[in-house]
Amino acid sequence: MNPLHVGDYADHAKATLAGDVLGYLDGGSGAEWTLRANTAAYQRIRLRPRVLVDVGTCDTSVDLLGSSLAAPLGVAPMAYHRLVHEDGELATVKAAGAAGALFVASIFASTDLAEMAAVATGPLWMQLYWLRDRPALLELVGRAERAGYRALVLTVDAPRVARRHRDLRSGFTLPPHVRAVNLSRELMAESHLAAAGVSAIERHSRERFDPTITWADLAWLRDRTRLPLVLKGILTAEDARLAAEHEVDAIVVSNHGGRQLDGVAATADVLAEVVAAIAGRLPVLVDGGVRTGADVLKALALGAAAVLVGRPVLWGLAHSGAAGAEHVLTLLREELAEAMALCGRPTTAQLDRSVLG
Ligand SMILES: Cc1cc2nc3c(=O)[nH]c(=O)nc-3n(C[C@H](O)[C@H](O)[C@H](O)COP(=O)(O)O)c2cc1C
Ligand SMILES: CC(C)CC(=O)C(=O)O
């Protein structure tokens, strides 16, 4: 059966992926309350369409930190794309470029960062966790700069990886052919070992992530790179204001797809609060639970400059490599254009609160 929407790709992944990989991909932390809340929040938002507007052409393009995108979409940073398809990130990078979307590479990408850059036809950003090993972190930043990555995305909602019951039950560890190739073998060694009550990736994060960093440390990183700095994992007006005061270039409203602190609100429910606190000083992106073009429209109407998409891209990759991942992104763009036409809002600039019920 040909997938017609993102849900079809989700169903295919459920039916075909190995149980432990599916659990890592689809799962969240704790009771997965926040994981469910992310999708439910978009479903609760109602639209207010205007009629008899000329929607002969609907323009989904946006500008983001100096890059123009055909769609206000990006691939969220996700570790280890090779877990679900042998082409891994090479396929998803190509897919993002073909769909006119941004690609954010994870620090735990399973493909060399220069090789990803070599096949990219659109903008690339590099995501980081703040490693205790600062020289290793800086070395990675230098390589990203030289390979042409256009921004650094520091994930700030994970001083360590949260307890994820599906991974604990399955004993999830990486298969030998999948590795975070942009980090040294020494730095990644513990990632293959689970311990009693701690999953392999949770244990690795406790050993390698620096949980002591604060707002004051951001200057250290800023002073050592010429790339714009984006913070991913902001959920409150207070932290949004601090991000602006610390001269961050953009933020991503994110709860890590319900994989970190279980019990936090859906991102669609806190977006307006964060956008109001930022007051136009910098772009606000959002991720978590985006599954349709109408969800993208709702996020933009709440003030997001663009939306990052996580699991759906890996479901597409698992289904049929680059073609599947590209189809997922193209579907979201086409659904967005349809929702804009049916709402009587032919440009992204017209997507504001007046379209929300
Ligand atoms: C399999 C998987 C791996 C992830 N790896 C990372 C990562 O390495 N770095 C990061 O900042 N976020 C990571 N995330 C979180 C995503 O960037 C994003 O916040 C989340 O997936 C968005 O929610 P969605 O999957 O509902 O679209 C990961 C998410 C998934 C599903
Ligand atoms: C390897 C993990 C730390 C990647 C991650 O952020 C996640 O699985 O959510």
Image: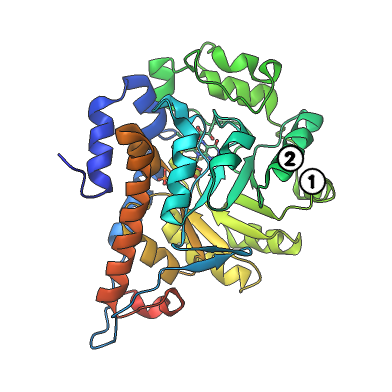
Mark 2 crowdedness (10 Å alpha carbons): few <14, some 14-19, many ≥20: many
Q: Residue at x 68, y 30 (%)?
A: 209
Residue 46 horizontal/vertical position (percent): 28, 69
Gap in angstroms between the C-alphas marked 1 and 2 = 9 Å
Q: Which mark is residue 141?
A: 2
Earlier in the chain: of badge 1 and badge 2, it is: 2
Q: Nearer the viewer, mark 1 or mark 2?
A: 2
Tag 1 residue: 221
Which amino acid type corresponds to the residue marked 2 in the rendered image?
Val
Residue 116 visible at all: yes
Residue 296 horizontal/vertical position (percent): 38, 61
Tally of numbered tags: 2
Which amino acid type corresponds to the residue marked 1 in the rendered image?
Leu
**In contact (CB < 8 Å): disc 1 and disc 2:** yes
Where's the N terminus, which quadrant?
top left
**320 left or right of 135?**
left
**347 left or right of 207?**
left
Q: Residue at x 64, y 19 (%)?
A: 188
**Picture layout, residue 14 above or below residue 251:** above
Which of 324/119 is in front?
A: 119
